[in-house]
Image: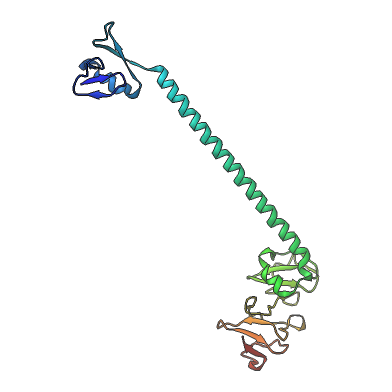
Amino acid sequence: MFVQENLTTTPHEVPGVSWELPEALAGKFRELGAFAKLALDENRTRITDIVEDTEKRAAVEAESAREEAEKAEIKEKREKRAKALALEEQGIKTMARVMFRSAAPRMVADDVIACRALAAEWKPGSYAVGDVRNADGVPFRCVQAHDSTGSPDWSPVKAPALWAAYHGRGPETALPWVQPSGAHDLYQAGECMVWTDGRVLRAVQATSYSPGESPGAWEEV
């Protein structure tokens, strides 16, 4: 095997350009690979040794380190940007929740239902009239100030005298039927709900009765 100064191997000698590689140096040549450097005799007629091209190795390692540093810098910038966006998004959501909770008592039912993801889930605590909380996917408004801290069963579902479910006025905001418990949470004329069979029904008059109990109080939308 003949080797050129650029370390290209050839089975045939190229006079003045390639030299026969001694068998004793073949292993060293393969070991050093791209960092091998030919040591020639004074007349440049034969290979006397295979040495490491330290300058080339240092240059390659420096370039590799530079590329790795660039990649790390890009990654760090992306991570910082992602964190900043996450914090910004979290801040926007927090602001939206605060604004919603402040405005909800004055909002119409359809708007509250459309934005119910901004309402907090109900948990035992102190509530004022107008406070809005979600329970079982339905937004409820507090109709009687109370403190349920020591009464974990006073949820909107289990204590309907304290809460009233919001009723949408169209198919888009209709929510599952919630049994009214009094005058404060009746279905008013024009309000809609989703009956147990999946139909969207609209109350044609104020009612606390279900379609099964009073079919004439409802019409299909």
Above or below for 86 versus 210: above
Residue 5 horizontal side relative to residue 72, left or right: left
Question: How many numbered marks are there?
Answer: 0
Residue 218 lies, with reference to residue 74, above or below; the image says below
Q: Position of residue 61 (x, y in %)?
A: 44, 25
Residue closest to the eye, 94 or 185: 94
Indicate whether 18 appears above or below 118: above
Q: Is residue 218 left or right of residue 53?
A: right
Q: Residue at x 52, y 31 (%)?
A: 69
Q: Quadrant of the N terminus?
A: top left
Vertical order, 51 against 119 (above or below) = above
With 14 as the anchor, is 148 left or right in this view? right
From the viewer's side, name the closer residue of 130 and 192: 192
Residue name at image x 67 percent, y 50 percent? 88
What colouring method underlies this structural image? rainbow
User: For this rendering, which residue is in front, 127 or 113?
Assistant: 113
Q: Position of residue 75 (x, y in %)?
A: 54, 39
Q: Tell me which residue sits at (56%, 81%) in the image.
A: 198
Q: Residue furthest front?
A: 15
Instruction: Name the quadrant containing residue 163.
Output: bottom right
Horizontal side, residue 51 vs residue 92: left or right: left
* Residue found at x 47% / y 24%: 62
Across and down, in percent, residue 183 comes to: 77, 84
* Image quadrant containing the C terminus: bottom right
